[in-house]
Amino acid sequence: MFYADEKHDKVVLIDLGSSDDLLQPELRKTFIDDNYKRSQHIHFVGTSQYMAPECARNKPTTKTSDIWSMGIILFQLYTGLCPFRGASDYLIFKLSLDLNFLKFEDYHESILSQEAKALIK
């Protein structure tokens, strides 16, 4: 979700689909057997195109999961396309799990500058 903060003239980006409370993980009661220490969730949440590989594997998330998603958003802002596209969530997950899928050299410098490629990586 995007919204403009009129008081501060900035855009705020929010996606809480697969969020966890890092300080109080026991607050999320959708864990298998209601045991928050198992670190696997019963329900699938999140947008497959932006989901970090550890989320797709139903593994614990960290702050680096957010950095992955930010890289996806930056790629989309530069190219106009999501880097992982498929006919189903399953196919998108398969592509995102293949870390060599993105071929940055396929994009002309006018679309993705060297600086942009470095930032996204």
Image (spheres, rainbow, N blue to C red):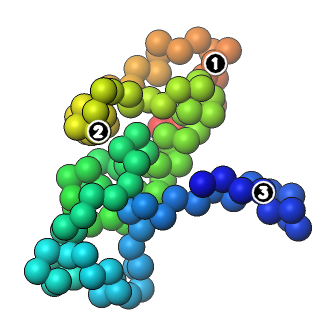
Q: Secondary structure at mark 2?
A: helix
Neighbour tally class for label 3: few under 14, some 14-19, many 20 plus, Cα within 10 Å: few
Which quadrant would the N terminus be assigned to in this image?
bottom right
- Quarter of the image for residue 26 reads bottom left
* Disc nearest the viewer among 3 and 1: 3
What type is the residue that disc 3 sits on? Ala
* Disc nearest the viewer among 2 and 1: 2
Percent position of residue 2, x then y: 66, 53
What type is the residue that disc 1 sits on? Ile
Q: Secondary structure at mark 3?
A: strand
- Give the mark, 2 or 1, whose residue is nearer the N terminus: 2
Residue at label 3? Answer: 4
- Give the mark, 3 or 1, whose residue is nearer the N terminus: 3
Percent position of residue 81, x then y: 53, 26
Q: Residue at x 38, y 62 (%)?
A: 18
Residues 74 and 82: in front is: 82
Inter-mark Cα distance, 3 to 2: 29 Å
Residue at label 2? Answer: 89
Query: Is residue 118 visible in the rendered structure shown here?
Result: no
Percent position of residue 92, x then y: 30, 34
Residue 104 appears left or right of 92: right
Q: Residue at x 16, y 84 (%)?
A: 35
- Give the mark, 3 or 2, whose residue is nearer the N terminus: 3
Residue at label 1? Answer: 111
Q: Which residue lies most toward the left here?
A: 33
What type is the residue that disc 2 sits on? Asp
Residues 1 and 97: in front is: 1
Inter-mark Cα distance, 3 to 1: 26 Å
Q: Secondary structure at mark 1?
A: loop
